Amino acid sequence: MGRDVLAWARVLRDGGPRAQPRKPETVRNYVAAVAPALAAWSDRYAHLREVTRDDVVAYLDTLCGRPRAMATTALRSLFSWAKRTNLIFRNPTGRIRCPRRGNPIWQPLPPDQVAASIAAATTVQARLFLALAAVHAARPGQIRALHLDDVDIPGRRITLGGNSRPLDDLTHRLLREWLTYRHHRWPHTANPHLLVSAESALRLGPVSHAWILNLRGLPATLERLRIDRQLEEALTAGGDPLHLATMFGISETTAIRYATNARELLNQPATQRIGGTTAGTGTG
């Protein structure tokens, strides 16, 4: 059994005719996940082909959460490889699925984390990125894709992802500042996108991913601010998914997920509703 497991680990590390090599840390994690089961089974069996489905289920039932998911994946990898190489006659992990991870329960961002991200936005375009994420729940890709025609300054509206929304005073002011800067900096560019850089002003495509405000290292990233904005609205609306779908133009599934998150928070004491996430119970 040990010889076969070593051969499987080498295929994970080096790859094979039908397998790509895995990262060293992945190989270590897989081997560590199956080691306790293999140690117990080797007391009773001399070969992997003797391991039954009941043995696998009994071992997995001793685990929960992430360790169970990792052990399930690793055992499926081991026995699938053994079946392909004709070391076993039947795969005992067949129809054993990885447990579905619950959705995280997002907590509202603490004010000091939001303040740190605001302080990091020192340019006119950075402040606009921040407002679009924190006020309008826009994804970075949606921000990059915005065209000049998506912004109606006189009518105070903006179209994000095909969804037209009213402009608040802050975003309206930041958009006017950016458009003034854009006109003075690149007066002759033919790029139709709202956001342009020194590189994209010479072509017609959107700005690069790297040009978007990078808040890496700060808890309140653009993505986290986007999530926080939708969560804030879900809490204000009492967990109404229809309101969220209409306001942000998100899918029914996403709206229900935020509404469920909000109801979980509303059932918690107010002192627990600040910062981070807690374990969820929803579907992945």
Image (spheres, rainbow, N blue to C red):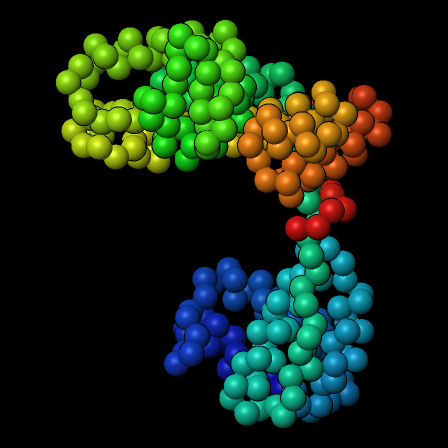
Furthest-front residue in this view: 155
Looking at the image, which is closer to me, 171 or 41? 171
**14 displayed left or right of 112:** left
Residue 129 seen by the camera: yes
x 51%, y 60%: residue:
25
Place of residue 118 in the rendered image (x, y in percent of width and height, measured from the top left): 49, 15
Left-right relation of 133 to 35: left
Q: Number of numbered discs present?
A: 0
Residue appearing at x 57%, y 86% in the figure: 83
Q: Position of residue 221 (x, y in %)?
A: 51, 29
Left or right, 84 with reference to 2:
left
- Choose between 44 and 167: the one closer to the eye: 167
Is residue 187 shown above or below 37? above
Quarter of the image with the N terminus is bottom right
* Residue 277 visible (yes or no): no
Vertical placement of 105 versus 57: above or below?
A: above
Q: Which residue shows up at 70% across the image and 33% down it?
A: 241
Give the image location of residue 184, x and y in percent.
21, 10
Q: Nearer the viewer, residue 245 or 109?
A: 245
The residue at the point 43 percent across, 32 percent down is 142
Query: Residue 75 sits in which quadrant?
Result: bottom right
Q: Find residue 283 and report its horizontal and vertical position in percent.
A: 70, 50
Left of 142 or right of it: where is 79? right
Quadrant of residue 174 within the rendered picture: top left
